[in-house]
């Protein structure tokens, strides 16, 4: 069962149909009676889609946003598929692979094809020398470098911090204790 909630806009039948079509392929992974909650939110120029669902008693959440609602829906579907694939891949050992995916034949070929490519690896390493700086200085430095995040030694708190640009245009700081 799929529950769709729209915030800040009127939900059209076309959007509902698109979501039902896309989510129907995931129903085979869910137990009978399990529901899937979809929340669509529109604010300013961003369309946000959140999906909450369970697969074999494990809860998942996939979230995506884009300027176009239909693109955001497609992106969240990709995230859901990756999460399910990862979950199913972790359920058993490599010896048991044919048994694990026997009940999910549509993913078996795709997982086998992407098995080599799916393993994340470190492809770049940077070394940064850092002098203590204040938060305003770190923001300026990050803007000059045109990065979305910046690690620095905070002169105020005397801790290592990560500064990042949020989706709403403001900044956030993660402090390491």
Image: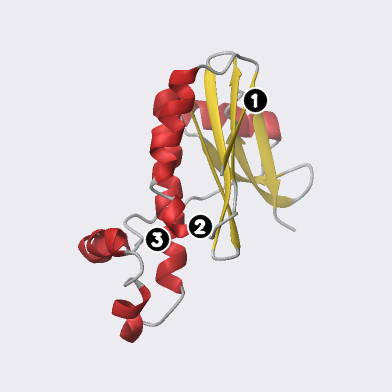
The image shows residue 132 at horizontal and vertical percentages of: 66, 44
Determine which residue is flagged by label 1: 170
Is residue 14 shown to the viewer in this render? Answer: yes
The image shows residue 143 at horizontal and vertical percentages of: 52, 26
Which residue is at 54% across, 65% downward?
56
The disc, 3 or 1, on the residue closer to the chain's N-terminal end is 3
Residue that protrudes farthest toward the bottom in the picture:
95
Which residue is at 44% across, 46% downward?
79
Is residue 166 found left or right of 119 in the rendered image? right
Q: CA distance from mark 3 to mark 2?
A: 13 Å
Q: Residues within 10 Å of mark 3 (few under 14, many from 20)?
A: some
Is residue 132 found left or right of 116 in the rendered image? right
The disc, 3 or 2, on the residue closer to the chain's N-terminal end is 2
Work out which quarter of the rendered image holds the N terminus and state it: top right
The image shows residue 10 at horizontal and vertical percentages of: 59, 14
**Disc 3 vs disc 1: which is toward the camera?**
3
Q: As rendered, which of 162 and 108 lies closer to the eye?
A: 108
Determine which residue is flagged by label 2: 30
Q: Which mark is residue 7?
A: none
Work out which quarter of the rendered image holds the C terminus and state it: bottom right
Callout 2: SS = loop
Callout 1: SS = loop
Q: Are marks 3 and 2 in contact (CB under 8 Å)?
A: no
Quarter of the rendering containing residue 101:
bottom left
Determine which residue is flagged by label 3: 85
């Amino acid at each position: 069962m799929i529950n769709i909630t729209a915030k800040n806009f009127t939900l059209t039948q076309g959007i509902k149909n698109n979501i039902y079509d896309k989510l129907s392929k995931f129903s085979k992974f869910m137990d009978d009676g399990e529901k899937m909650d979809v929340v669509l939110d529109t604010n300013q120029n961003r369309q946000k889609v959140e999906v909450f669902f369970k697969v074999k008693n494990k809860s998942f959440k996939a979230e995506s946003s884009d300027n176009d609602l239909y693109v955001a829906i497609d992106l969240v579907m990709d995230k859901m598929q990756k999460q399910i694939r990862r979950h199913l891949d972790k359920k058993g050992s490599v010896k048991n692979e044919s048994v694990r995916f026997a009940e999910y034949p549509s993913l078996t070929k795709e997982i086998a094809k992407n098995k080599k490519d799916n393993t994340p690896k470190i492809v770049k390493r940077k070394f940064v020398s850092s002098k203590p700086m204040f938060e305003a200085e770190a923001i300026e430095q990050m803007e000059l470098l045109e990065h979305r995040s910046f690690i620095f030694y905070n002169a105020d708190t005397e801790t290592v911090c990560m500064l990042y640009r949020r989706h709403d245009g403001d900044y956030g700081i993660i402090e390491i204790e």
